[in-house]
Image (tube, rainbow, N blue to C red):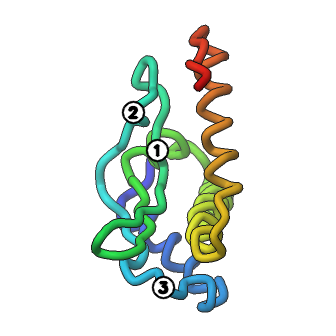
């Protein structure tokens, strides 16, 4: 298991290594919150939200959930944890940049992952 400060430091290092232009209009910045967050469609409290891109009246922000990250990846070695955090940050930054570009390909992909999860668990999603 990792301490909150260790995860925060790794995320800071990863964010600092990426081109600044990727963060344009990300006025809410990047945050790490202490809690775990369960996805609202989780069937058995088994689907964690590791991070999310948030747009609201306050602006655009990326939020990561320490409790979720530690639950899913807490037993990994440091190098693999760093690699997983890099993937997570890239994923959320892509959401931000797709929003700025007026697309949502990654959002569609995320939705497909949830549908796959539901199907694997015997739930037939409603077709609208």
Left/right of residue 69 with respect to residue 81 in the rendered view: left
Element marked by disc 3: loop
The alpha-carbon separation of the residues under discs 3 and 1 comes to 23 Å
Element marked by disc 1: loop
Residue at coordinates 39% horizontally, 83% vertically from top-left? Answer: 27
Circle 1: is it few (<14), some (14-19), or many (20+) Cα within 10 Å? some
Judge whether residue 78 can be spotted in this image: no
Q: Between residue 65 and residue 112, name the one nearer to us.
A: 112
Ranked by sequence position, the earlier of labels 1 and 2 is 2
Q: Which residue is mark 3?
A: 25
Q: Between residue 90 and residue 8, name the one nearer to us.
A: 90
Left/right of residue 28 with respect to residue 93 in the rendered view: left
- Please identify the quarter of the rendering in which residue 30 is found: bottom left
Residue at coordinates 45% horizontally, 74% vertically from top-left? Answer: 9
Q: Between residue 69 and residue 44, name the one nearer to us.
A: 44
Residue 32 position within the rendered picture, expressed as x and y whole percent measured from the top left: 37, 64
Q: Which residue is mark 1?
A: 49
Front label number (3 vs 1): 3
Front label number (1 vs 2): 2
Residue 54 position within the rendered picture, expressed as x and y whole percent measured from the top left: 41, 62
Residue at coordinates 52% horizontally, 40% vertically from top-left? Answer: 72
Ranked by sequence position, the earlier of labels 3 and 2 is 3
Residue 18: assigned label: none
Circle 2: is it few (<14), some (14-19), or many (20+) Cα within 10 Å? few
Ranked by sequence position, the earlier of labels 3 and 1 is 3
Left/right of residue 108 with respect to residue 48 in the rendered view: right
Compared with residue 46, is residue 94 higher up or lower down, i.e. above or below? below
Compared with residue 107, is residue 30 higher up or lower down, i.e. above or below? below
Circle 3: is it few (<14), some (14-19), or many (20+) Cα within 10 Å? some
Q: Which residue is mark 2?
A: 40
């Amino acid at each position: 298991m990792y301490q909150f400060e260790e995860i925060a430091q790794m995320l800071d290092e990863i964010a600092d290594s990426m081109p600044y232009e990727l963060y344009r209009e990300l006025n809410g910045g990047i945050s790490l919150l202490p809690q775990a967050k369960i996805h609202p469609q989780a069937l058995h409290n088994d689907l964690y939200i590791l991070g999310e891109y948030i747009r609201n009246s306050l602006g655009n922000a990326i939020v990561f959930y320490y409790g979720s990250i530690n639950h899913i990846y807490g037993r990994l070695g440091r190098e693999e944890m760093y690699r997983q955090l890099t993937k997570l940050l890239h994923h959320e930054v892509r959401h931000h940049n797709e929003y700025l570009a007026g697309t949502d390909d990654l959002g569609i992909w995320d939705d497909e992952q949830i549908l796959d999860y539901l199907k694997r668990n015997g739930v037939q999603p409603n077709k609208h």
